[in-house]
Amino acid sequence: MNLLRPQIEAVTNNLIDNILSGPAEFDFHDDFAFPLPVIIIAGMLGVPEVDLERFKHWSDIQVAAMGAEDPSRYEEDQIEFFGYMHSHLMSRRSDVAAGVDVPEDLLTLIASGSDADGQLLSEADAQSVLMQLLVGGNETTTSLITNLLWRLLESPNQWQAMQEDATLIEPAIEESLRFDPPVLGLYRSTTRDVSLHDVLIPKGSKVFINYAAANRDSALFNDPNRFDITRSTRERKRHMSFGLGTHFCLGAPMARLETEIAFQAIMQRLPNLTLIGPGQRIAPFFLWGRRKLPVQS
Ligand code: HEM
């Protein structure tokens, strides 16, 4: 994971250079927290620099469509995106098959990946892995970065404490994940009757697993409704924000690393940030993050 560090640092510093050369008031979501993970994943997927703006737009569309009352208005963009990723994947596949020297990136890994029977992944499966990485990884990391800055700026003592002691960055990231989980919950389907706390959930039910509620369980967390970056190590990582068990988030180390590097740089280069409004939340009901976060440097 640390191989990604120099690239994340470079993108982070470029974004901050742009912020510092612009107006003192800016939108932290649009100018920093949104582009950072998109640019990193685009690099890992071998998306050429010239396509970056379109790629960012398409990533945004995926989330807008999830929260829309009428997702059909995004169909055209989604079809275009699907077509783009399809030709991107196929051209890498034919390069691999022809023995052309290809970059050792995530796209090559997916393009030449095989299933449990040793067969090359079907095109549909490979495309689905690509989409899962994009949709699952981008907006969530953006939300983690915006949510953390939002709470710290609302609580200037904690922002100050972190500036004085950089070792608080890691606990602050975990506290943000607990207090403001970017994914509030996800669904599961029961494959058999299940009884929980004397309630029978019949086979074939849809159950919403509410990570956010688990993260505020007073049996596990002292004063759970308080945002506190100095929680004990024992409490710190008990949150459910990356899920649990077989489907535990594959991108958790990457999200943590991007956020850590982002805050190291923000604290050094933008130490006087202040909130100039509460911003807006993102639309999908099961996700939690800021779509806008206006700040002043
Ligand atoms: C703060 C950022 C993130 C949060 C809060 C988050 C949250 C989650 C959650 C709740 C799950 C579902 C677990 C379950 O179903 O039990 C999940 C799964 C997944 N995440 Fe993340 N995620 C984040 C970042 C990322 C990143 C950066 C990537 C990849 C680049 C990623 C890729 C995935 C994948 C591939 C899965 C499916 C794993 C499986 O089904 O085995 N996530 N994530």
Image: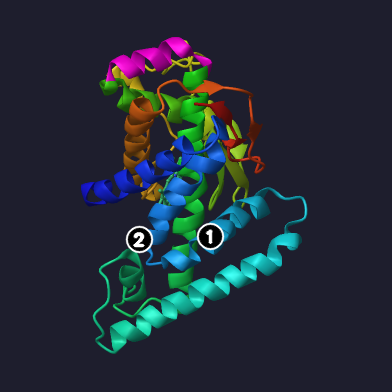
Cα–Cα span, label 2 and label 1:
16 Å
Q: Which residues are magenta?
A: 154-165
Provide the major secondary structure of the magenta segment: helix
Q: Is residue 291 visible?
A: yes
Q: Amino acid at mark 1?
A: Glu
The image shows residue 93 at horizontal and vertical percentages of: 36, 81
Mark 2 = which residue? 44
Q: Is mark 1 within 8 Å of ligand 1?
A: no
Q: From this view, report whether residue 38 is shown above or below residue 195.
A: below
- Answer with left or right where residue 183 lies relative to residue 114: right
The image shows residue 243 at horizontal and vertical percentages of: 43, 41
Secondary structure type for disc 1: helix
Q: Is mark 2 within 8 Å of ligand 1?
A: yes
Mark 1 = which residue? 53
Q: Residues within 10 Å of mark 1 (few under 14, many from 20)?
A: few
Q: Amino acid at mark 2?
A: Met
Asked which quadrant contains residue 58, the reply is bottom right
Q: From this view, report whether residue 126 is shown above or below residue 2.
A: below
